[in-house]
Image: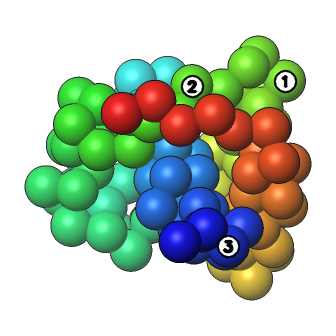
Amino acid sequence: MIKTPCETALWYTLPAIRRELARILVEDFKIRQREVAKILGLTEAAVSYYIHKKRGRAIEFDENIKEKIRELAIDIVNGEDHSLLSKKVCELCKLVSPKISISR
């Protein structure tokens, strides 16, 4: 059965975005995993999995997408409204999904 774009985004794109976002927040902005989990609405274990590439590893982003995720991280650090953050994640999914090739 063919996966719809939303299924692909849910199973592959969103976890990869979360992986990169968690990594940036922890490594670059020195935010504790516990706080990142709270910010992203995840468990601490999920954040750890993302950081250690045990989850969300099917997609590697090009530098353009990584920069957009970094901008999202900056918005989070600056306290941007969560509804705007959700919209930005959706925009990222739309940018990434047509380009992805899944590696398992």
Quadrant where the image shows the C terminus = top left
Number of numbered tags placed on the structure image: 3
- Disc on res. 81: none
Query: Would you place residue 62 above or below residue 85 in this image?
Result: above
Q: Position of residue 25 (x, y in %)?
A: 47, 38
In the foreground, 89 or 30: 89
Question: For the point 39% across and 43% down, which residue is it?
Answer: 56
Toward the bottom, the furthest residue is 83
Instruction: Work out whether mark 3 precedes mark 2 in sequence or the reverse, and give the earlier one.
Output: 3
**Which structural element holds mark 2?**
loop
- Disc on res. 4: 3
In the foreground, 4 or 50: 4
Real-space CA distance between mark 3 and mark 1, rounded to the nearest whole angstrom? 25 Å
Q: Is residue 79 visible?
A: no
Q: Is residue 17 visible?
A: yes
Left or right side of 98 for 46: left
Category of crowding for the residue at label 3, using alpha-carbon neighbours closer than 10 angstroms: few (below 14), some (14–19), many (at least 20): few
Real-space CA distance between mark 2 and mark 1, rounded to the nearest whole angstrom? 12 Å
Q: Position of residue 97 (x, y in %)?
A: 75, 51
Toward the left, the furthest residue is 45
Q: Hey, which quadrant is residue 76 in on the image?
A: bottom right
- Disc on res. 60: 2
Q: Position of residue 41 (x, y in %)?
A: 38, 74
Q: Hey, which quadrant is residue 39 in on the image?
A: bottom left
Q: Hey, which quadrant is residue 52 in on the image?
A: top left
Q: Position of residue 46 (x, y in %)?
A: 22, 56
Q: Which residue is mark 1?
A: 64
Question: For the point 29% across and 44% down, which residue is it?
Answer: 55
Name the amino acid type tagged 2.
Glu
